Image (cartoon, rainbow, N blue to C red):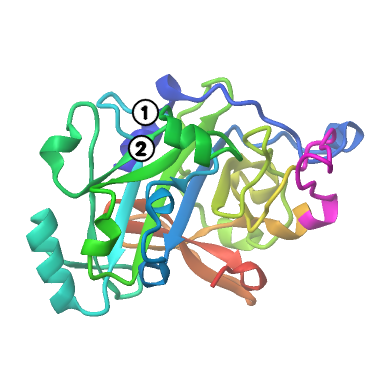
Amino acid sequence: MFHSYRSAMRSAALSALMFAICSPAARAQQPPAPHCTIVAIDKYLGVRNLPEHPESYLQSICLPQALPRMEDGGVQCEVRAHFDDMETARRVCVDHFQVPGRLDEEGVPYCPLRQATAQRPLALQGPSFYYDDSSSTATSTCRKGGSQRIGFVPDNLLYILDAFKLSIHCELSHADAGELDCVTPSQTASAERYTGQACALAQPTSEGFNISATYLGTPAVECGSGMCLAYGLNGSAAPDCDPAKQTCLDEKSVREHTRCTCRCSATDPGDAELCKCPSGFACEPLLRNGPTTDGYCVDGRLLRR
């Protein structure tokens, strides 16, 4: 699902502004920024911790930035309901979604929710999720980073599922002037050698980086034309960042959170090269293509648990 999306990004590339993360003088001495940035957004909701009647909260799982719509009106998102045991997962998945229970990357049972779109109306989908970037609810409850959210049908969907967690994973790509297909590069044997080295990655929006998103830029000169990873950043690194209006990041913080990476795991690697993460780094699942997932090396000190 996501691979086909990335390969089509020449025609669907966003015209988002790319803001450099260092001063103009420093930028002049730096290698050119990667042509393509893949953004993976992950949001989690502990279902059992919800209050008794959180109607507005249930309707407003806000996303940090807007997502491009596909031809059918949908977006590149997957929502999973996670369960304590496979028996419960099988029952809920079959009863509500007519799909079998599955195991995620850590062996936890889950079932995927269906996405309702303009071509797949809510009334025909049953329990489902949808992307909303225009309703009054989105405008009033999701203000930081734009007005976009994931909504659920019915509104109390999270209560009727006997799940302990809901996870939302979305991906989008920013291509530089549409000159390249926004795809993950073929990994070379040298990728492992560069992993952990400092690299530069432009922030994809004027709002800056968001803690719930992971950013992979390619091709990165400092990484041997491989991938540069920004992980755990929250705020703007633009030179004109106003601390009175937003969180501003200094160069030291950006450097600590931006490193070369390599693909260390894949559900279906095929003939692709996989690397071994250096000491102090962990192989984390970052990009998802339906039931398949690609893992990349992340500095263990930055991991969100």
Labelled pair 2, 1 in contact (Cβ < 8 Å): yes
Which amino acid lies under the numbered mark 2 shown in the image of this protein?
Tyr
Compare marks 2 and 1 and give the one earlier in the sequence. Answer: 1
Which residue, given by chain and number where applicable, does mark 2 sit on?
A: 131
For residue 48, above or below residue 176:
below
Q: Nearer the viewer's eye, disc 2 or disc 1?
A: 2
- Of residues 96 and 191, the one nearer the viewer is 96
Q: In the picture, residue 190 is in which quadrant?
A: bottom right
Query: Label 2 vs label 1: CA separation?
Result: 9 Å
Q: In the rendered picture of this protein, how many numbered marks are placed on residues? A: 2
Would you name the residue on which mark 1 appears? 69
Question: Which stretch is magenta?
Answer: 237-253
Q: Is residue 239 magenta?
A: yes
Q: Judge whether residue 276 can be spotted in this image.
A: no
Describe residue 300's horizontal placement relative to residue 271 as left or right: right
Q: Residue at x 31, y 36 (%)?
A: 4
Residue pictured at 19% horizontal, 36% vertical: 122
Residue type, mark 1 in image: Arg
Q: Where is the N terminus found, in terms of image quarters?
A: top left
